[in-house]
Amino acid sequence: MGRLFLVKGGQVPMTDIIEHTESKHSEPKHSESLTRVVIRFAGDSGDGMQLTGDRFTSTSALFGNDLSTLPEYPAEIRAPAGTVHGVSSFQVQISDHDITTPGDAPSVLVVMNPAALKADLSRLEPGGMLIINSDTFTERDLDKAGYTENPLENDSLNGYRTVLVPMTSLTKEATVPLGVKPRDADRSKNFFALGLISWLYSRPTESTFAWIDEKFSNELVRTANKAAFTAGFNFGETTELLDHRYEIEPAHMPSGEYTNITGNTALAWGIVAAGQLAHLPVFLGSYPITPASDILHELAKHKHFGIRTVQAEDEIAAAGLALGAAFAGHLGVTTTSGPGLALKSETISLALSLELPMLIVDIQRGGPSTGLPTKTEAADLNIAMFGRHGESPLPIVAAYSPAQCFDAAIEAVRIALKYRTPVILLSDGYLANGSEPWLLPDPAALPDISVEFATEMNHIDDDGNPEFWPYLRNPETLARPWAIPGTPGLMHRVGGLEKEDGSGNINYTPENHSKMIHLRAAKVAGIANDIPDATIVGDEDADLCIVGWGSTWAAIDAAVQRSRRRGTKVAWVHLTHINPLPKNLGAVLKRFQKVIVPELNLGQMTRIIRSEFLIDAKVVTKVAGLPFTALELEGAIIEALQDPPTAGDPGVVASSVLVSGDSEQQGAAQ
Amino acid sequence: MSDTITITTKKDWTSDQEVRWCPGCGDYGILQAVQMLMPELGIARENTVFVSGIGCSSRFPYYMNTYGMHSIHGRAPAIATGIAVARPDLDVWVVTGDGDGLSIGGNHLIHALRRNVNLTILMFNNRIYGLTKGQYSPTSEVGKVTKSTPMGSIDPPFNPLAVALGAEASFVARTHDLDRKHMMEVFRQAHAHRGASFVEILQNCNVFNDGAFTDITGRESRPEMLIDLKHGEPVRFGKDNQHGVVMGPDGQLRIVEVADVGDDALLIHDAHRADPSLAFALARLSTDDHSPTPFGVFRSVERPDYGSGVAQQLLASSAKKGPSDLKALLRSNGSWQV
Ligand code: SF4
């Protein structure tokens, strides 16, 4: 669940779980109460698994469960049907208490075809429930999935509770009498699966029917989908394969109004809000790139907020548009993913030299190059920190949960405007597409982040006449005045050439260049006085401190809780501001014997912490296109505490989550 | 923002910065023409923005007492698009060169023209890289011997006007640095045009490519080499207007003697023709710098400009969805109470 982090003095919250399980029985089929369940829907890209997952999520959100989702889909738009390559899946954890992750291993896996079974079986927990669309286990489909033997006919599924359901034929039976062509009936089978799972987990059905009515304009499609859903639901009630259903009570969440939100939507809304809070029109220059395009799509819908969105000719132009708009007095924003950030680098350096506010959003994905466009990674920290020519520091803010992307966007814009600097906001594919319930903030309680444009001359020339100096700084923030075209008397020229502090005239002297470089660095460093201190979550007297940043928050949160419940002392600091870092961070970390940094890269933040504070921080690394599981990080905590004291040890890697074949294993590598 | 236009003079439009082009450079004449024209346009300095990229020509904004940005190599059209779309109330000028606009920034130039962003784009074409000390440019003739092409360049050049026309530019013109009156007239029309105006200015780089255009623009050669296009008039030139341009049955333009074909056979220039093929043919009439070459406005057609389109969508969206409401936005995907 996402919470509002206050712009100042806020701290990253940790959830608190008390797990309990109790059973109650009722007739005709009794139901069992669970505290949480992790369900994974897997099928071919064409099987509508994202839609099924989304729908199940929305129903559960409306029901009042806490939840977290992990959609995974192939990079190809139409990957070859029936192949492992083309499997699309959606994992969701729902619970009756506060949770942050989509769960490590699913306890229920719904597979629509052999390829999905092949791709995802290894993720299912031992003894987990496997619900299979048995109609698709034909020779042809088995062959496409690469099975030489039918797994339904050998013992490979022993150890799971397997439920075979002929979903395709049951869907046909339910829909063809209504006038649906047999071929089209196939398209409703995901609603059969949704109906069955909705029965199994005692989900209310009204909201799904209402949603079908709204979503599908074709009446026959509406009818078919509802019929398939009902057939799936009734199948659960009558089949002897399932002897009881489950219930997950609503979570005890703080009272208020909630919506279910993905990271990209929250981020887009954060930009909308930031424009309102700054009283500035938003101008987005963007070029389509996965997984950032949804922000462009979302913002393009909200023109009545005065938001201009321009789909530029390329990534470079997208940044140029935002910078031009900023010069003209708008809130200039550009959104992208790793490869696009590389292309924007030169423009960002100009923005930094012009000292104009601008927001650059990077939704990180697996790299380098095109890499894994639809999978998550957090390996753009280096390029965000250092990926520009010359001495070019800029502030970096990192979002840590889907809903928190909203606050992170506002905070990044606040810094950009106040300090007249480009700011990079880092999110990633996992946050972008993952969702969670969000306690809606009261817009009136959001911070005022407005700044003033210059309207008056600010200097007297040698002859005693007033003039305008575009680089005469605010002594406290070191920000320069923002004088926009249209303001009489303040005409001035800015450019990429080195300029004289104050007057802004071109100046190449050694003294001036040195002064300007130091001033630009000091301005960014000074922001440390304007961001929250690092706060310790967990045991202040622990030997081990975990430093997290970005989307690892969810898995760290779960791992820290589990470790502490087992009696292991552990402390945790989660960073929302990456540059500058909180000014107490060094002192805080030096109190601990050991520091580990879980990262979805090979240790980019670890290196920063080591070099900034001369602390022997070690990385826990995973670069598999997937987020950490809580189990992996629990293992890393144990391992770190077992290690002999790290002083003098030249290695930087605490542990490395290696992913081999279809299964994820945790291995130690020093 | 300010509505009152005070009467200005050239001096008011001149910044206090020392002009730093090489003595004798053609850029001085262009700067003069622009600074002299501005007071005549009835616009306010504070509502005027000059944006440039990198190169000799791109120093231009520093010398204008307006708002200005000296940006990144090739990126001026993109940055200027941001300014013009954000603020349709501003007069936005782009100053670029053949390397800046057609090489490193080619993509931004063609898209600014395609979108018809309300920009006045002045491209100083000297067929050479000046600021980096004399490498061949994308408009250098084949065989150009420079420091980077000691055995002569191999790649054929762009024809800037043909590129602009191919990019659907709604206003395309050519002038040269030796005729201030002609420059001012072309700039005036380019500025008056709503949408993207593209002006190629043949400009002499006396240090690295001296005399590149002398055969056409030199005082002596002009009468026989410079074809002055006038909308609605026959295309003819020469000391005694004795030469003319006709369109052959194959659609090809040819230079002829008027005496041979008669007045009525001459091509009548039509800058407002929706179809750009005539302008294209005129743009390609001369393929070198030693034959008769058309100058003036090749094409000037009305087409909706991008910034106005963006502004209209904003208004239409407000009319449909009402005033912005953050509270409602946050609930737009459904919400529930706990
Ligand atoms: S190098 Fe050529 S174009 Fe550049 S300023 Fe000197 S003469 Fe002018």
Image (spheres, rainbow, N blue to C red):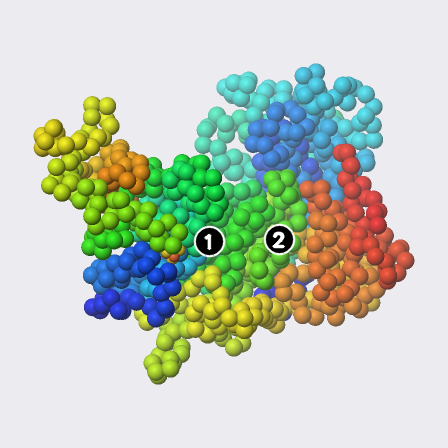
Could you classify mark 2 by the number of other residues whose Cα lies within 10 Å: few (under 14), some (14-19), or many (20 or more)? some
**In the foreground, A296 or B228:** B228
Tell me which residue sits at (79%, 55%) in the image: A652
Tell me: B18 left or right of B174: right
Q: Position of residue B77 (x, y in %)?
A: 39, 50
Tell me which residue sits at (64%, 61%) in the image: A578
Which residue is disc 2 drawn over? A383
In the picture as drawn, the residue positioned furthest to the bottom comes out as A464
| Above or below, A481 relative to A322 | below
Q: Secondary structure at mark 2?
A: helix
Say which quadrant the N terminus of chain B sits in.
bottom left
Which residue is disc 1 drawn over? B132
Label annotation for residue A132: none
| Above or below, A493 relative to A67 | below
**In the foreground, A637 or A179:** A637
Tell me which residue sits at (83%, 47%) in the image: A669
Q: Position of residue A146 (x, y in %)?
A: 72, 22
**In the foreground, A73 or B26:** B26
Label 2 beta carbon less than 8 Å to ligand 1: no
Q: Amino acid at mark 1?
A: Thr
Tell me which residue sits at (25%, 58%) in the image: B33
Could you classify mark 1 by the number of other residues whose Cα lies within 10 Å: few (under 14), some (14-19), or many (20 or more)? few
Q: Amino acid at mark 2?
A: Ile
The quadrant where residue A190 appears = top right
Q: Position of residue B280 (x, y in %)?
A: 28, 35
Figure quarter occupied by ligand 1: bottom left
Q: Secondary structure at mark 1?
A: loop
Of all chains, the one bearing label 1 is B
Tell me: B71 left or right of A652: left
Whether residue B267 is visible to the viewer of this picture, yes or no, is: no
Q: Are marks 2 and 1 on the same chain?
A: no
